[in-house]
Image: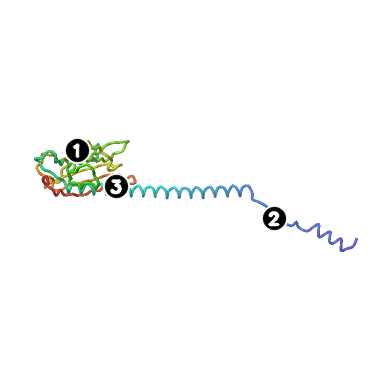
Amino acid sequence: MCATCSNNRTWAFFAPPIPRSRAGFTLLELLIALVLLSLLTTALYASYFSVVKARERAVAGMEERRELGATLDLLRREINSTVYNRDDKRLRFVVEDRDNFGKPASNLELTTLAVPQTGQVRPESGIRAVRYEMVEKNKQTILTRREQDLFYDWQTAKPYPQMERISGFLVECYDGSKWVRTWSSLNPNLPAQVRITVQFEEDGKPVEFSVLSTPRIIGRP
């Protein structure tokens, strides 16, 4: 045997093995990847639902504020246009204090001027009897409103929800010296001012908004 062949066989015997490339992942690596993916997915879902809930709360709050603004503006305009004469029993301005377990609950009944609706078939006098009252329905407190023409009462009007999910409705009258929660037809005049306060909950916290109104009409037009 030649020396060259012997040297080659010796080198081949003692040569270190060539490392083989890794073809996949171990079970431990797959488990770690799955855990990280689950954590990431959970965080993304939580963030998404938080954004959705925040958006829903914002939309609900905007709707409640819009409903509140419309209700207070309607009350202010109706009180400003109150028609009252103590000699005419049909013309009324009455405030009743109906405290509901510590929460303010007033009933308001008044006669007020109203513009007849265009296209109305039946005759309109322009004077309407309006009544506001708080009622309990489906475990919610609702402010209802009932309206009917004073002189052309074709049928008894039914109350309808004016504002839902409220916790308090308070009507206060200023008699020139103090604020009172009741006003009857025995009073010869209208109050100098009327303050309407609506209470409701927003994000679990009680909030209230008030509006002042001044009756400007005395006597039947």
Indicate the position of residue 12 as horizontal and vertical percent values: 81, 58
**Residue 132 lies in quadrant:** top left
Residue linked to disc 3:
67
Tell me the kind of residue under disc 1: Asp
Indicate the position of residue 174 as horizontal and vertical percent values: 14, 46
Indicate the position of residue 184 as horizontal and vertical percent values: 13, 39
Tell me the kind of residue under disc 2: Ser
Secondary structure beneath label 3? helix
The relative height of residue 160 versus residue 26 in the rendered view (above or below) is above
Color scheme of the displayed model: rainbow
Distance, label 3 to label 1, CA atoms, is: 28 Å
**Which of pointers 3 and 1 lies earlier in the amino acid sequence?**
3
Label count reads 3
Secondary structure beneath label 2? loop
Residue at (25, 45) in percent of width and height: 198
Residue linked to disc 2:
21
Residue at (29, 47) in percent of width and height: 67
Using the image as rendered, state which of residue 17 and residue 111 is in the foreground.
Answer: 111
Q: Badge 2: few (under 14), some or many (20 or more) residues near its Cα, within 10 Å?
A: few
Would you say 174 lies left or right of 168 here?
left
**Marking on residue 153:** 1
The relative height of residue 137 versus residue 39 in the rendered view (above or below) is above
Residue at (26, 37) in percent of width and height: 135
